[in-house]
Image (cartoon, grey):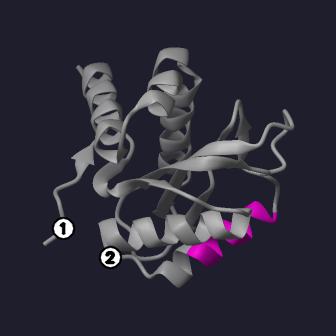
Amino acid sequence: MKTPAEMTIHFALNPDAVAIESAASKDEIFGKLAQRFAAAWDLEPEAVFEGLDEREKLGSTGFGRGVAIPHARLPGIRRPLAALIRLKGPVDFQAADGLAVDLVFGLVSPENCGATHLHALAEISRLVRDERIHQALYDAPDAEAMYALITNVTDRDAA
């Protein structure tokens, strides 16, 4: 049975969707994200990978400051779902600021949810722009601590 999801206002996050991983390329990162989405949400990893890859062809989702937010819209999803991976080493993501990425927040949303998808992206963006949260995610000793940090912050912000 899947672990219950923590719901934020704009996306759901599940402990199985958070990990610390090694990856050597953008494709490998997408593969790791696809595995996280499969483990946490029973999504088809191939569909997730293809969706992330197709979106990335439009331009890098490298957000800056070592963060990427790859995202896609997929059929069969009811609400935006997130995954978070801290990489053990930085990977070039062709980010606008030129910095390699070592924190990746993946997002998949229903295929026909324009504003909902944008609100979820904005919430993730706010999280990673907050310097205290940004640093705390890097300093977290494990994936469980990363998950707790994100869910505690989103719970606080919702109150």
- Mark toward the start of the polypeptide (2 vs 1): 1
Residue 68 visible in this rendered orientation of the protein: no
Relative placement, left or right, of 12 versus 44 is left
| Above or below 59: residue 133 | above
Instruction: Identify the residue shown where x is 17% and y is 60%.
Output: 3
Amino acid on which the number 1 mark rests in the picture? Lys
Instruction: Identify the residue shown where x is 81% and y is 61%.
Output: 58
Relative placement, left or right, of 83 versus 57 is left
Q: How many marks?
A: 2
Q: Position of residue 127 (x, y in %)?
A: 49, 28
Asked whether 84 or 61 is in front, the reply is 84
Which quadrant holds the N terminus?
A: bottom left
Which quadrant holds the C terminus?
A: top left
* Magenta span: chief secondary structure: helix
User: Residue 76 sits in which quadrant?
Assistant: bottom left
Q: Residues within 10 Å of mark 2 (few under 14, many from 20)?
A: few
Residue 48 visible in this rendered orientation of the protein: yes
Residues in magenta, as a range: 49-57
Find numbered disc 1 in the image and state the secondary structure of the residue it sits on. Answer: loop
Label 1 sits on residue: 2
Relative placement, left or right, of 91 versus 110 is right
Magenta stretch: residue 78 in it? no
| Above or below 32: residue 90 | above
Amino acid on which the number 2 mark rests in the picture? Asp
Asked whether 110 or 2 is in front, the reply is 2
Label 2 sits on residue: 42
Q: Position of residue 39 (x, y in %)?
A: 33, 71
Find numbered disc 2 in the image and state the secondary structure of the residue it sits on. Answer: loop
Residue extending furthest toward the left: 1
Q: Are marks 2 and 1 in contact (CB under 8 Å)?
A: yes
Instruction: Identify the residue shown where x is 70% and y is 62%.
Output: 24
